[in-house]
Amino acid sequence: MRKLLFLAGILLTGFSSQAQIEEIRRITETLCSPEFHGRGYVNKGDSIAADYLVSEFKALGCEPFKGDYLQHFAIDQVNTFPGKMSVLRNGVQLDPGIHYVVHPSSPGYQGKLDPAVLTGEQMFDQDAVTEALGGILEGTSGKNALALRLFDLSADSLKELRGITEVLSDFVPVIELVDEKFTWSVGRSQLKNLCLQVNEGGYEGGALVFTVDIEAELQKEYQSQNVMAYIPAQKKCKETIVFTAHYDHLGRMGTEAYFPGGNDNASGTAMLLTMAKYFQENPSEYNILFIAFAGEEAGLLGSKYFVENTPIKLKKIRFLLNLDIMGSGEEGITAVNATLFEEEYNLLNEINTELGLLAKVKRRGPTQNSDHYWFTEQGVPSFFIYTMGTNKNYHDIHDTYENLTFSEYEDITKLLVKFVDRLD
Ligand SMILES: [Zn+2]
C-alpha cells in the first residue's frame, strides 16, 4: 500500500526522484564550496552566490521580477575576518573553528596574551573581578588579559554570566574557556578589545599564554543583494505564491576556515531551484515568485529591505513559504505560524497524511527567527518551514555538504507542490 501511495505521489507531482536528488546535490555542493567563501562578507562570497543563483534561475527559464533578478541593498556595518587568523596556546597552534572561534564582533589583535584566569566562583565575586581587572589596568599583576573558565558550570550559572565577556572586553582582551560546541554568528559592530572562545582542552590551571595574530575589518555600507525569479501563472492571475530562502551564511573566519552553511541554508536555497524547475515545467494557477534573501544571518536584513521596498503588492501574496534548514527531516517538519493560519495548516497536514510523506508536520506559533517574520508583521499569510532530524550541525564549520543526507528532500518538495496546487 505504501508503495502504491508512493507511486501515486510521483505521478501526481511529476518529480523524478533520481534526477532531482542529483540536481540538489550539484547545487548544494556548489553553494557550500570554498569558492563561495561561506556566502558571507569576505571576498564577496554573498555576491558570488547571488550571481550563481541568477544563472541557475535563468537556465531554468525563470523571468526576472519587474525587470530585475537582483534587488540591491546596503548593510550599514558588518564585522569581518578577511586575513590572518592564528592562535597558539602555550606554543601549540590551534585550529580555527575546531579549537577556537573569535567573537563575531571582535577587533583584531597581534601579540601575546598572558591572561589572569577567573574561575566560575570568582566571576560571581565582584571583588575578585575588580581585583583582576585592576591588576591588569594598573600594570601590577603582569597580566594583560582575562580568561574566563566557563566550563564545569551549571546551565543556570552560564545563563547568569551571559554578556560578561562583552562587558569586560570594554577594558581588556577576554578569552572564554569553554567545553561546548562553537556556535558562530555575524557581528554588526566592533567591541573595544579582542574576544576569543577557546576549547578548554583539559585546562586545570597553570601556565596559559596565547600568541594571537588576527585581522578584523569592520566594513561600512557593504553592498549585498536579494535574488528574485518569477514564473507567471498559466492563465492571468492576480495572486502570487512566494517561495523564500536565505542564501547567505556566516562567511569566513580568516583565510583557512569558512562556514559552508549546508543545512543553513544551502538546503533551502537549492529547494527554491527545485521548485522553480517544477513550476517552470508545470505552471501553476498562481504566479510564483522566488526570493533568495541575503543578510539573514546578519539580522534578517535582506527580507527587511524587501518588505520595506517591496516590488510586489504584499496584499497580492496568497501565501508565502519560507524554507530555512531543509536538509534533514527524519523527524518531520515544523510549520511556524500554523496557529495563525489554521486552514492552510490543516491542508498541509492532510496532504502529508494522504500521500504518506513525512513523520509529522509539527504545529508552531509565530517566531522571529527567519525571513518570514517581516512578512508576518505586515499581515502576509505565511509559513516558515524547517526540518527536524539527525543533523545537529548549526552555525559551525561542520554544517557541510557532506553532512547533508537529503533523506526527506523529495517528500518535502512533493508536499509543498501539492500544497500550492490545492490552495484556494
Ligand atoms: Zn538560516
Image: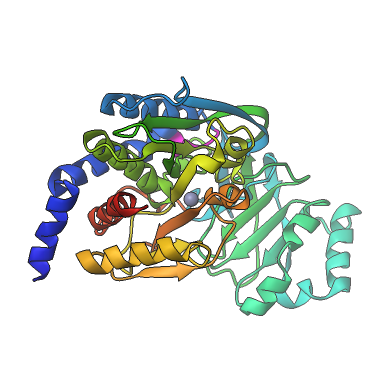
Of 209 and 228, the residue lying toward us: 228
Residue drawn 45% across the image and 37% down it: 291
User: Main SS type for the magenta part?
Assistant: helix
Residue 159 lies in what quarter of the image? bottom right
Query: Is residue 403 highlighted in magenta?
Result: no
Q: Is residue 137 above or below residue 303?
A: below
Residue drawn 63% across the image and 80% down it: 154
| Residue that lies at the very extreme toward the right in this rendered image | 138
Q: Position of residue 236 (x, y in %)?
A: 36, 31
Q: Which residues are magenta?
A: 37-41
With 203 as the anchor, is 195 left or right in this view?
A: right
If the image is split into quadrants, where does the N terminus sit?
bottom left
Q: Position of residue 253 (x, y in %)?
A: 53, 41
With 421 as the anchor, is 295 left or right in this view?
A: right
One can see residue 119 in this view: no
Q: Is residue 246 above or below residue 423?
A: above
Q: How many marks?
A: 0
Q: Position of residue 173 (x, y in %)?
A: 74, 51
Residue 275 lies in what quarter of the image? top left
One can see residue 68 in this view: yes
Q: Is residue 181 above or below residue 309?
A: below
Residue 130 lies in what quarter of the image? bottom right
Residue drawn 59% across the image and 51% down it: 379
Residue drawn 69% across the image and 40% down it: 109
With 44 as the anchor, is 241 left or right in this view?
A: left
Q: Is residue 104 above or below residue 156?
A: above
Of 424 and 196, the residue lying toward us: 424
Of 175 and 67, the residue lying toward us: 67
Q: Position of residue 172 (x, y in %)?
A: 79, 52
With 151 as the anchor, is 265 left or right in this view?
A: left
